[in-house]
Image (cartoon, grey):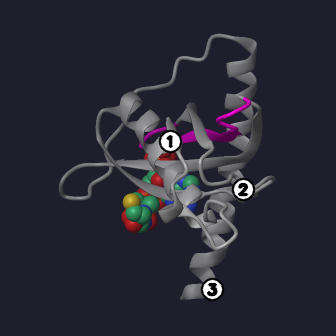
């Protein structure tokens, strides 16, 4: 997904707002997941997000999203964010995020999703790493639920 950063998305310094980047990450991740599941989805979790470099008004923001693992009704997507200077073409990675989406129907019931076919060594490595992140996320969710009781 590619967009030009417009003044409406920016803070007074002329850099895109963190919240605007988060919105685009959510959209790019959801599109990749929709293409895998062809179902309705909700965002269940977003892993720790960092902003390495600002992206200024007039530059391009580029988001690359790829499903890394699919389980029963949930799946993980990796979203990488880059800036590209319009006048020079210089591209820098600015953020990376892992999001989990859960597949649901119109009544909000969870819907099983197709498995992800992992073929290359890189895909297998990413899927194995996703298993570890999922365990951490579910542990974090349990802890939060216990605190909210
Ligand atoms: C996310 C949500 C659907 C989970 O529903 P739930 O009934 O509590 O979840 P369950 O324990 O039955 O888990 C369902 C699946 O979601 C996964 N899941 C749930 N919470 C998760 C989390 N925090 N991180 C990772 N995966 C999670 C489970 O592992 C399970 O996956 P699986 O079927 O592939 O094994 C529910 O909490 C919800 O609707 N949250 C609000 C979502 C929302 O409003 N998002 C923003 C707007 S889209």
- Circle 1 sits in a helix, a strand or a loop, which is it? strand
Return the mark for residue 136: 2
Instruction: Give the percent coordinates (x, y) of residue 49.
Output: 71, 58
**Real-space Cα distance between discs 3 and 2?**
17 Å
**Which of 3/66 is in front?**
3
The residue that label 3 is drawn on is: 147
The image quadrant where one finds the C terminus is bottom right
**Real-space Cα distance between discs 2 and 1?**
33 Å
Instruction: Give the percent coordinates (x, y) of residue 112.
Output: 35, 38
Residue found at x 46% / y 25% = 115
Say whether mark 2 is within 8 Å of ligand 1: no
Q: Is residue 13 visible?
A: yes
Q: Is residue 74 visible?
A: no
Around disc 2, counting alpha carbons within 10 Å, would you say few (fewer than 14), some (14 to 19), or many (20 or more)?
few
Q: Residue at the front extreme?
A: 87
- Of badges 3 and 1, the one in the foreground is 1
Q: Indicate whether 81 appears above or below 120.
A: below
Q: Where does the magenta region start and end?
A: 71-88
**Which of 50/132 is in front?**
50
The residue that label 1 is drawn on is: 3
């Amino acid at each position: 997904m590619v967009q030009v950063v417009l003044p409406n998305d920016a803070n007074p310094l002329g850099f895109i707002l963190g919240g605007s980047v988060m919105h685009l990450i959510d959209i790019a991740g959801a599109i990749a997941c929709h293409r895998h599941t062809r179902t309705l989805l909700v965002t269940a979790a977003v892993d720790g997000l960092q902003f390495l470099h600002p992206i200024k008004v007039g530059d391009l923001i580029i988001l690359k999203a790829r499903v890394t693992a699919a389980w029963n009704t949930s799946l993980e997507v990796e979203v990488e964010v880059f800036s590209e200077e319009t006048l020079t073409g210089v591209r820098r990675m600015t953020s990376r995020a892992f999001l989990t989406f859960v597949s649901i129907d119109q009544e909000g019931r969870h819907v099983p999703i197709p498995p992800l076919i992992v073929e290359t060594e890189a895909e297998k490595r990413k899927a194995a790493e996703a298993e570890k992140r999922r365990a951490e996320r579910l542990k974090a969710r349990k802890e939060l639920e216990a605190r909210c009781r």
